[in-house]
Amino acid sequence: AHVGAHLPDYMVPAAFVRLAALPLTVNGKLDCQALPPPADEAYAHRSYEPPQGEIETALAQIWAELLGLERVGRHDHFFELGGHSLLAVQLLSRAVDLGLKFSAADLFQAPVLRELASKIHLEPQPSSSGVICVRETGSQPPLFFVPTGLGDYSYVLSLVQEMDAGCPVYALPWPPFSEVQFPTLKEIASQLSLAVREIQPRGPYRLAGYSSGGILAYAIAQRLLDQDEAVSFIALIDVVLSSNPSSVSPTQMVQEALLESLELDDERFEILERFARRSSISQFLEKAQKIGAIPLDRNLHGDIRTSERAMQFQWALDSYQAPSLPVEVYQFYANEPLRQRARSRKNSIGPEARSPLRGWDRILSTEAIHAVPIPGDHRTMMNVPANRLVLARCLSTALGQSATSYAGKWVMTE
């Protein structure tokens, strides 16, 4: 409570752990992997009162599983117990599967279990699409976000919290991937367009994607246009359209993305980078866990499955030829270069990554691309709060301008 009175929410620790000394690497830097996981008593539990009713009980069970706690009371606070955006996405996804209907905005506004339960409706038939409602209300057409190339759409929750846009917002998960036959990007887009149309039967449609996921947003637009529907807005958040096929295999590309995401000192980074050249994704993750880059008590099954799906998605991206569509796009590009440690990543960066248009002028006219600079590099534009706030405001402005512009065109056409 004291810290929360002086700092913004994202800087308030979820847990407090006493240490005699900070663990250090051989180079004298903080060894994050050696930090002990917070025990149950490290979190800010409220006075315990058991959940009441069907909804509170179901919700408490999901919280306990996600947060690794023995029990959750009706007065407990999701974020004070250690919840964050990635766990919030998993919470929303599991809730949808059980027919518990609420939005991410509800969770952020009412993070105490009993308060959140009062906002939840029980659906008699849970949706099979798995689409997450991030914001439920608004007078403008909805905005649909797609996952990144690693299948992550947790970025949407933090971004939308800071957006000032008068529209509902949804996050689309990847559809199920076949373990036998890799899907094409058109097939993935076709399945996601069905999920979009389940929520919004007719256009105009508005789509957004971050990183290589933005190419999937473009493919969904292609599918909707093929069905004679209107697409009025496409937001590409630092999305590069390469002119040449990558020399890096999909498996290696996913491994290197994982390498960059792990907190590693130079020695362990080099060990894993060398190992990645001759290993499968599951072997790579097991090796990362063995050398302490991933906690030893973590079950790798989910990480392996997600990474294998990311590899399938990367294969679909590599095989996709983006056509020229009669659309306008907003390219929110990072105005700082991304520092890459992986050798093949450094060598594979093409000239498109250094252009504000990010290579989209190969298939669209420059007049159809609205390039908007955002502070930070490809990662920090989204994970540094000050940069993300700029992105949220620019995205909100673009949505408003697009709605006004499209309404004017519609009136003139009619």
Image (cartoon, helix red, strand yellow):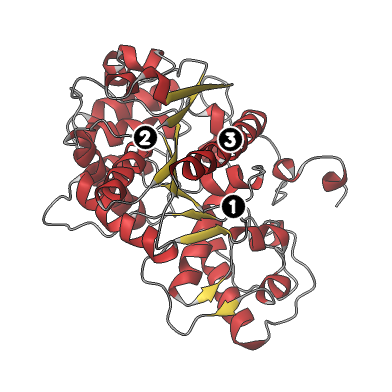
Q: Is residue 235 above or below residue 109?
A: above
Q: Of label 2 and label 1, which has the lower sequence position?
A: 1
Say which amino acid is labelled 3: Gln
Residue corresponding to mark 3: 401
Mark 1, secondary structure of its residue: loop
Q: Which residue is under mark 1?
A: 167
Badge 3 crowding class, 10 Å Cα cut-off, few under 14, some 14 to 19, many 20 or more, is few
**Which numbered dot is residue 52?**
none
Counting from the top left corner in percent of width and height, residue 255 is at 29, 35
Residue 78 found in image quarter: bottom right
Which comes before the other along the chain, label 3 or label 2? 2
Q: Residues within 10 Å of mark 2 (few under 14, many from 20)?
A: some
Whole-angstrom CA distance, mark 1 to mark 3, is 13 Å
Q: Residue 240, percent across and down? A: 35, 25
Please name the amino acid that badge 1 sits on.
Cys
- Which structural element holds mark 3? helix
Query: Residue 364 occupies which quadrant of the picture?
Result: top left
Q: Amino acid at mark 2?
A: Val
Q: Nearer the viewer, residue 326 or 255?
A: 326
Q: Label 3 vs label 2: CA separation?
A: 15 Å
How many numbered marks have been drawn onto this rendered protein structure? 3
Q: In this rendering, is residue 138 above or below 381?
A: below
Circle 1/circle 3 CB separation < 8 Å: no
**Image position of 286 (left or right of 263):** left
Q: Taking the image as drawn, is residue 377 in sight?
A: no
Give the x, y percent position of residue 201: 40, 63
Residue at the image position 35 percent from the left and 33 percent from the top: 257
Residue extending furthest toward the left: 180
